Image (cartoon, rainbow, N blue to C red):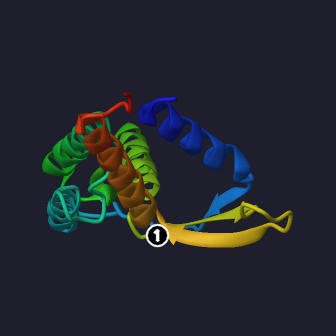
């Protein structure tokens, strides 16, 4: 059996051993502004936090593009009206929908979001609750993937006489 097959089997086995009860805590809304000046500050902060090392660094490229498009739509509304109070109903609805879309993505990719699950440890039938931040989970996943890629590059010697 090759090392690659063994690693894949071990990863699959660990996944199957973990029970599936997972939940996450709620986080606050990130994007909420009532006027152009407040929105400019929020917009800059969101873009900064989506960079590597930021709170939302694990957002995918597609999610970043979607967030940027929604933020651009919101910016154009604030450029046109200045404040939410001056917007017509259609614009307020558009602003609300854009805010909700951005907040949903950022909440899902928030490094500080706490994710808890019920896990059955190997050799036991007693589940236990473990909690980690989304950032810790993502970093562990990326470290595991890197390790597996590194192992594929190591030459495998087969014994023989």
Residue 9, image x, y percentages: 58, 36
Q: Residue at x 37, y 28 (%)?
A: 161
Residue 110, image x, y percentages: 39, 61
Q: Is residue 59 above or below residue 158?
A: below
Which residue is at the front of the view, 83 or 70?
70
Q: Is residue 135 visible?
A: yes
Q: Residue at x 23, y 63 (%)?
A: 35
Q: Is residue 70 above or below residue 86?
A: above
- The quadrant in which residue 65 appears is top left
Q: Is residue 106 visible?
A: no
Q: Is residue 125 above or below residue 86?
A: below
Name the element at disc 1: loop
Residue 47, image x, y percentages: 17, 56
Question: Left of 57 or right of it: where is 21?
Answer: right
The residue carrying mark 1 is 28
Q: Residue at x 52, y 29 (%)?
A: 1
């Amino acid at each position: 059996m090759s090392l690659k097959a063994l690693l894949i089997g071990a990863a699959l086995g660990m996944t199957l051993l973990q029970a599936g009860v997972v939940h996450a805590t709620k986080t606050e809304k990130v994007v909420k502004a009532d006027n152009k000046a407040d929105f400019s500050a929020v917009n800059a902060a969101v873009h900064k936090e989506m960079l590597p090392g930021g709170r939302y660094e694990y957002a995918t490229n597609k999610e970043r593009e979607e967030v940027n498009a929604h933020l651009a739509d919101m910016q154009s509304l604030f450029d046109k009206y200045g404040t939410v109070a001056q917007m017509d109903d259609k614009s307020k609805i558009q602003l609300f929908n854009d805010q909700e879309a951005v907040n949903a993505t950022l909440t899902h990719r928030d490094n500080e979001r706490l994710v808890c699950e019920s896990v059955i440890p190997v050799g036991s039938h007693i589940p236990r609750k473990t909690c980690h931040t989304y950032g810790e989970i993502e970093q562990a996943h990326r470290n595991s993937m890197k390790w597996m890629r590194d192992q594929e590059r190591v030459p495998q010697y087969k014994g023989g006489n």
